[in-house]
Image (cartoon, rainbow, N blue to C red):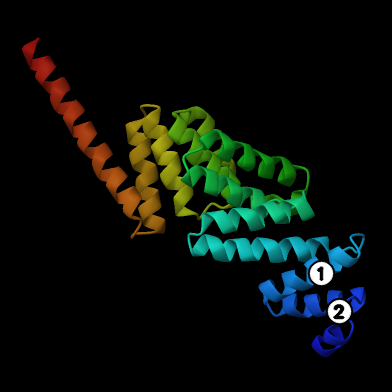
Amino acid sequence: FEKAVSIDAHNVNVCKNLGLIYYKRNEYVKALECFRKVHRIDSTVNLNIEYATASYKIGMIHMEQNDLIKAKKYFEEAIKILPSYPLPYNELGIIYARQGDYDKAEAQFMRVITLIETNPNDYKKGTRAYVNLGFIYNNKGAFQKALVFLEKALEVDPLNPEIYNHIGIAKCGLGLLPDGITFFEMTLQLNPTHHAAAINLKRVKETLIQERNYNATIAKEH
């Protein structure tokens, strides 16, 4: 196929098939080059799933390298190719969250939820969006709202320690400190090296001790 492309660079079928070969080999950069060429020659060719996935995969590579600008570019390209593809929206939301723009992040995560709820086959893909929305709402102080999405995430992925940690944060935000302790402990049961949960657990226990000591002092004074 590579030889055929060099002979006839404008042959749509040859470019498409070569791109699919690269795609199956997980050589997404080469695959994307072929898919782009196909669409330049004939934009009606149906390569949307492979084309969008290749762009998404390259975006993920840039995310791992912490190059958010390039990652964003590829996620946006994937969405443009296939607007019904939920995964790039989630990653865009993460980028916005890292940049502190929680409103834009929330909009992207909600887009994922909308897409997966209209397609039950994608329901599992929504777990991260539910967790990320929980994170966003916890950061906004909307703890009850956070719990709604975190509990949905738990239904789909009941062994994910990150979900229990975020629920613990929401419970503490609502003033339910003993419940928060329970969820932080469950996080550590699933992942004993979960650093954030260990810190959260320590802080909440210290807060409870301080409250009890304070209450005991007040009781003595009266």
Q: Residue placed at 36% from the left, 27% from the top?
A: 175
Instruction: From the top left corner, tell me how far across and down residue 40 is, in percent.
Output: 85, 64
Amino acid type at circle 2 is Ala
**Toward which corner of the image does residue 24 lie, by quadrant?**
bottom right
| Residue with the most extreme bottom position | 3
- Which residue: 80% across, 69% down? 35
Q: Secondary structure at mark 2?
A: loop
Q: Quadrant of the N terminus?
A: bottom right
- Circles 1 and 2: CB atoms closer than 8 Å: yes
Q: Position of residue 36 (x, y in %)?
A: 79, 66
Residue 144 rendering spot, x and y as whole percentages: 50, 28
SS assignment at label 1:
helix
What residue does disc 1 label? 37
- Lower sequence index among marks 1 and 2: 2
What residue does disc 2 label?
9
Residue 29 in the figure: left or right of residue 179: right
